[in-house]
Amino acid sequence: MISLEQKMLDHSASMILLVDTDGLQIVRANRQAGQVLGYTVDELLSHKIVDIESSLQDVFYWEEVEAGAFTEIEWQEGLYCGADGELIEVSKSISLIQHEDKTYLLVQARDIRQERKTEEQLEQTLSRLRATLEATGNGILAIDWHGRIVSMNRMFSAMWAIPDELLEQHRDDDIIGHVSSLVSEQAACRERLSAIVDSEESDEHFNLADGRVFECKSRPQYLGEHIVGRVFSFADVTRRVAAEDALRESRDELERRVEQRTGELQSANIKLKAEREQQAALIARLEEAQSQLIQSEKMASIGQLAAGVAHEINNPVGFVKSNLGTLQRYIADLGKVLKAYAEIEHELGEASQASVSQLKKELELDYLQEDLDVLLAETNDGVQRVQDIVRDLKNFSHVSSSDIVLANLEMGLDSTLNVVWNELKYKAKVVKEYAAIPEIMCAPSQLNQVFMNLLVNASQAIEEHGQISIRTASSEAEIRIEIEDSGRGIPPENLGRIFEPFFTTKPVGKGTGLGLSLSYGIVKKHHGRIEVSSEVGKGTRFTVILPRHVDYSAGESAGENGAK
């Protein structure tokens, strides 16, 4: 049993190693250390700390420990050697621990490879940002919370012709004043450059006294949720503004001409949209049909294999049962002989009687005769159980049972339970509440597939141990089969989608999303329906409702549909 201390160690996000200073043997380790280094915990306990710590300063440190110099370390960097020989950068601390007259060193370490990678990526990002700042065709100005200029690129200083002495002396107020003096609306420009705490993005034009037009875009700089500055981008849009004015007149004329064709284009667009929607629906139906066909073919192959296996098992089991019956008769005959010998035993001499009695005592003859009956009965019961399982397997697979036949669905439920019992027995208690429903015309193998899917889903919905209830009921017009579990339930937002093809709430690799879709299709082809109700945390109930009287002779049968 894992101790409480070991469980506490295993919940730590850091690697933890406890080292005996006498010999430097690792005496305790947590699961995180094993996962990072590539060892099991037991493998780590067979190593010394010097097998793990590989940097030169680590080697010197542990040599000092062996010499009796115990020094605590507060988070310094080092190298660990993994099981595959890879060197792992770590940040570690070492603490001294005294316990029961022994001295230990507690080593705590963090894998900092990802931190190093992040730092390198950050440096690359900053370098790229600096290069981008200079490579852009716009003038960039960044001002902090206090109104100080924190950065500007060469394009900004050139387009505003800022004097060199202002730049060299970092006279921020004078630089802002110089910029504002070149704009026709100086007050508005200075107000914009001072509005650092404004949370809105801005996009406006400044008309310069020399006739140029500058576009100014700005947005706040955030640190977390707090504004710490503002970044301005200036672009010379003089030519663009003049071109836009010319284009505006042309656009007005063009819009008048476009209006004449708008009606035609709208009609064509509506028609095209309708055609695309029809194509998308057709493709979706084709994909669903293809997936269902593949799943049906798989189930048919599994059915053939199960039937073959059942046939191969049935033959030797038949031999065993036949020979067991013969053995019982032989043992009964031997019992009669032993009884006859017992009746004339008193006619033997005293020496012979003593010898026979001794032999019977040594062989425990009375016990053997009683135990033989018990052993034979248990063996008969075991053979009968194997035959029952084989019969249920054949009934479940029933390769030719896509045809419509009169079937007892409660027997189908029992057969399916036996087939999936290994999936259920450790997860749930199964409670059957059968109402002796009447037989109906159906494709039993296909409905068995529906029952199997619902039972397996119910088992998988139960996380530890719960209950699965199977109920049947009938009325004059229909029969009902309920399969209810006490599992985790289905969230309301998913309840309306569970019968969609490929929709699944299971983890990747645990389900295809086709099981309930195929089950829905099978029940629908039997002119029935599936109802579902669920409550998160309490469980789910699926109800299969089938009509008692259906004329399958008029049109496709459920079996023919299911085999397509």
Image (tube, rainbow, N blue to C red):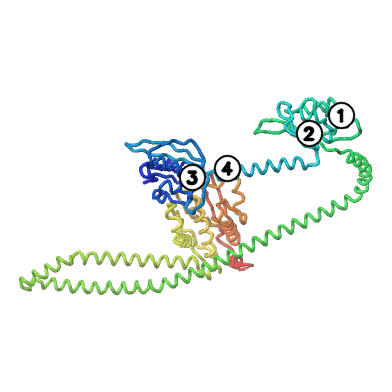
Label 4 is placed on what type of residue?
Glu
Q: Secondary structure at mark 2?
A: strand
Of the two numbered discs 2 and 4 in the rendering, the one whose residue sits closer to the viewer: 4
For label 2, the crowd category at 10 Å Cα-Cα, with few meaning under 14, some 14 to 19 and many 20 or more, is few
Q: Are marks 1 and 2 in contact (CB under 8 Å)?
A: no
Q: Which label sits on residue 56? A: 3
Q: Which label sits on residue 202? A: 2
- The image quadrant that residue 171 belongs to is top right
Label 2 is placed on what type of residue?
Ser
- Which of the two labelled residues, at mark 4 and mark 3, occupies the earlier sequence position? 3
Question: Disc 2 and disc 4: Cα gap in Å?
Answer: 37 Å
- Which of the two labelled residues, at mark 2 and mark 3, occupies the earlier sequence position? 3
For label 3, the crowd category at 10 Å Cα-Cα, with few meaning under 14, some 14 to 19 and many 20 or more, is few
Residue 477 visible in this rendered orientation of the protein: no
109 relative to 194, above or below: below
Query: Which residue is tagged 1?
Result: 182
Question: Disc 4 and disc 3: Cα gap in Å?
Answer: 22 Å
Query: Which residue is tagged 4?
Result: 115
Q: Position of residue 477 (x, y in %)?
A: 56, 57
Question: Disc 1 and disc 4: Cα gap in Å?
Answer: 48 Å
